[in-house]
Amino acid sequence: MRTPMIAGNWKLHKTKNEAFELIRTLSPATLEIDDVEIVVAPVFTVLDAVAQVLNESNIKLAAQNCYPEPFGAFTGEVSAELLKDVGCDYVIIGHSERRKIFNETDLFINKKIHSVLDADLKAILCVGETLDERENGQMFAVLKNQLTNGLANLEHRLMDKIVIAYEPVWAIGTGRTASPQQAQEIHFFLRSLINDLFGPDVSEKTRLLYGGSVKPDNIDDLMAQPDLDGALVGGASLKSEDFLRIIKFKKSNSSFS
Ligand code: PGA
């Protein structure tokens, strides 16, 4: 069975003190949870400090981005090698904000994925369509391109280091969540694609997260869908109470029961 993952993407939020405060609440409250993988993705500047306090906890550390070269004359960039050095387990790659604001292409994203794996870290690869693409009937083609190109030239055995996050752009930070049925439709599509690319064993094992306005009041219905294996949470991961409720989603109707 796939272990569900709940990952908090803090985006450009939280000073060092605010980060400590959040982790100080989350850590003890999640110590007993062994059936959900919990991840937080703070900004680069607090990763090292947060890594120290996460040591004794059940929470794993992710970065929100990386540059695909390990070292060199790349002013202002941070590599997967250096993220490994400060104790990260995961790197989020290809978030729609990076695709849109920083013009990241599938080719660049694919290079980053390889650099993450070369550094012996794991990647959370984000894919998602815009509202225009959904309404113009391009959604499946867009998602297929993002997934196929993002995972290009990847050895099958490395797919256990990849988590996919489906984040429809129109649902991110908008309060407009995809319905559980809409999310399931896409997750089923993505799992079938992974089956075509890497075979049934890999597709059965790969975790597919949903992201886009995940909140305490919609997580249970989302997680009840058979192909949803967790969530990438933005806004609601900044408040301990909300994030904890999401981590403790009700499993009664879900495939994990
Ligand atoms: P949101 O962000 O939960 O605030 O919509 C999700 C994300 O961008 O990862």
Image (spheres, rainbow, N blue to C red):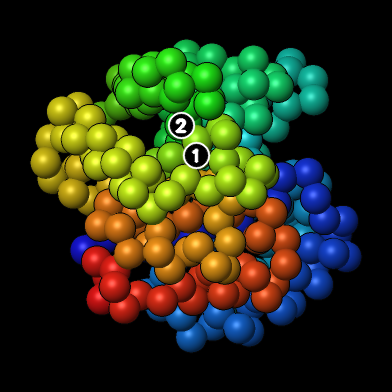
- Residue 155, placed above or below residue 172: above
Q: Is residue 178 left or right of residue 40?
A: left
Q: Is residue 26 above or below residue 184?
A: below
* Amino acid type, callout 1: Glu
| Residue nearest the viewer, comparing 62 with 169 | 169
Q: Residue at x 53, y 25 (%)?
A: 130
For the N terminus, which image quadrant? bottom left
Instruction: Name which residue lies at 11% across and 41% down.
Output: 200
Lateral position of residue 217 relative to residue 139, left or right: right
Q: Determine if residue 147 is in view.
A: yes
Name the residue located 54 percent from the left edge and 14 percent from the top edge.
105
Identify the image quadrant of residue 11: top right
Category of crowding for the residue at label 1, using alpha-carbon neighbours closer than 10 angstroms: few (below 14), some (14–19), many (at least 20) = many
Residue position for label 2: 127
Q: Quadrant of residue 141?
A: top left
Q: Are marks 1 and 2 in contact (CB under 8 Å)?
A: yes
Task: Check mark 1 vs ligand 1: CB closer than 8 Å? yes or no.
Answer: yes
Seen from this angle, which residue lies furthest left?
A: 200
- Is there any visible trace of residue 124 in the rendered image? no
* Residue pointed to by mark 1: 167
Quarter of the image for the C terminus: give it: bottom left
- The residue at 13%/45% (across/down) is 201
Q: Position of residue 192 (x, y in %)?
A: 19, 35
Label 1 vs 2, first from the N-terminus: 2
Element type at marker 1?
A: loop
